[in-house]
Amino acid sequence: MRNLHTMVYEPNNVALALRQLSHSGGRDSQGPDGTNIHTLENYSVVELSEIVKDRRPNKKMEYMRRTYIPKSNGKKRPLGICSIWDKLVEKCMQLVLEPYCETKFVPSSFGLREQVSAHNALAKVKNHAQTIPYVLAIDMQEYFGTIDSDIAYRELWHIGIKDKVILNYIFQFIKKGYFEDSCKMEDPKGAPQGSILGPLISNIYLHRFDVWLRDQGDCWHDKSNTRFHNWPAKRTYLRKTNLKVGIHVRYADDILIMCRTHDEAERFRYSVTRYLTRNMRLTINQEKINIYDLTKERMKFMGYDFYAFKQNTKNPKKKGKLMVANIVPQKRADEIVNECRRLLHNIQKKATIQAIHNWNAYVIGIHNYYRGMTHFYKSFDLIGWRIRKLFYHIMEAKAKFTTEQSHKDSFLSGRYRPWGRNGYYCFANVPVIQIGWANWDSSLISGNKGKVSRKNPYDYQERNHKPSVSMKDISYLVNSSKYLKNSKYAMFRISKYNNTHGKSFLSGERVTVQEYHCHHILPVSKSGSNDFDNLCVLLETEHRILHSKTSEILYEMYPRRKKRVKLLIEKL
């Protein structure tokens, strides 16, 4: 762990970072120097590797461009947009550091991690609150903007990252300034929100805090720790440790600690506040720190309202015991209704495929997040009832009502198959999903005895990785593409061969990687692009004949592929 920086600029790592950046959501956003993902296209992977190698030890960084996005409470959240060169270095570092850090993070940390979602955090809250209903909610004020560079350096060393080249780069990354209103602003604190390294640094920053909380509470539920489950000596060990029973859940800067009594919650409130303010130099948002008794009041957490009630059942084992319910808050339901009305008015103004897609994307996204909650169908049926007149009025005028089930049943692998049996609205063969089509998922927010199991995101097993061609062929193409002058063309050259199973565009027969030539259908000299759709697989001899003066020979060689031959010749 003292010599990690050589892995950062290794060409294979740079190639993977480049591929992931090209699929990221903010790839087209311009940094303060006007660069974006398209800036990297004119460099080979080896050249980009040398650039990363040069920028990393020199700690050369551009000022960020700061922008603001609105929050639900009316305030604005600052985002820092870096140049594409800083993004590339950050991504290369993330690919090296994150797999190691994932092995160190505790199971109670759920935010901004691979294969861990908000539903895992909600599942743990729902399971443990049944027996410990007193919940201490803590929120930090501007957490990302108050991360201290000195403490971050200390925590990175403590977790095991001891490469000083990387540590010094991250130290300067936290102190990096930004542009705002055409002025350069120095910022000695904070991990920029929207950056690539920001989420990883934020989790490492609070890792020791997570370990401290876990040792105070979660170990009670660890059966392998026999001293806390050995009845004759249990009281002796209790006196030695003086532990408070508390299970904590942390999602980024939102912290919940579930306790047995109100007194223990107060003790946690004092100790946690003292730890965060003194040891981590963070600021607690006093307006949002609160202790909830779920049997008497509702707690808002991550877009849900949680409350506990006693079960009224004939089963003697369950009767009188607490059950935790999670529902949509009224304020959030109003926001969903308002957004649905806005999207419907857009369809009313101009009914297009994009407008229908925006409506479906929003409705499906809301269903995906809430379909594991209590009374899911009842809540969304009520939301659908509030917009029913507007929905049917617009769809009657802009869409077609049909009873043909094939379009709906083939949509999203038949997720909405049970709905619309008597008919539904369809626009250009695209079904219009209604907000009331609510399919409850009993396993979405659930856990096995309060424990949430997760897959290892870095365990690429053979059954999960099935390329169309052999890994030996892909490795050959990766190594041979490092020196190509256009990195975008180098990536799509590999993808095209894999996607077509290595078969020639003309003959349809398998082409070996040694004889594989990647051809531009529309040449670059005629404004052709390096995009995936503009490339095709050809045999070396086919490619040479195509660019020769006797390209008509291809008609005789492939009489059944005359349309394809004609296409390639005419584009030339």
Image (tube, grey):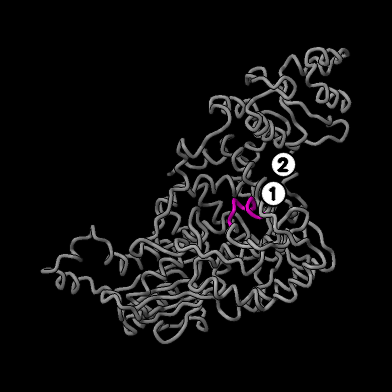
Q: Is residue 452 magenta?
A: no
The quadrant of the picture occupied by the N terminus is top left
Q: Is residue 167 left or right of residue 556?
A: left
Depth order, front residue of 305/493: 305
Depth order, front residue of 491/57: 491
- Majority secondary structure in the magenta region: helix
The residue carrying mark 1 is 84
Number of other residues with Cα within 10 Å of mark 2, as a class: few under 14, some 14 to 19, many 20 or more: some
Q: Residue at x 82, y 12 (%)?
A: 556
Q: Residue at x 78, y 61 (%)?
A: 400
Chain-order first, disc 1 or disc 2: 2
Q: Residue at x 33, y 76 (%)?
A: 132
The residue at the far bottom in this view is 296
Q: Residue at x 43, y 66 (%)?
A: 123
Q: In the picture shown, does residue 359 fall above or below 49?
A: below
Distance between the alpha carbons at the discs numbered 1 and 2: 8 Å
Q: Is residue 413 magenta?
A: yes
Where is residue 408, by image quadrant? bottom right
Magenta residues (range): 408-415
Residue 156: image location, x then y, percent:
45, 55
The residue carrying mark 2 is 40
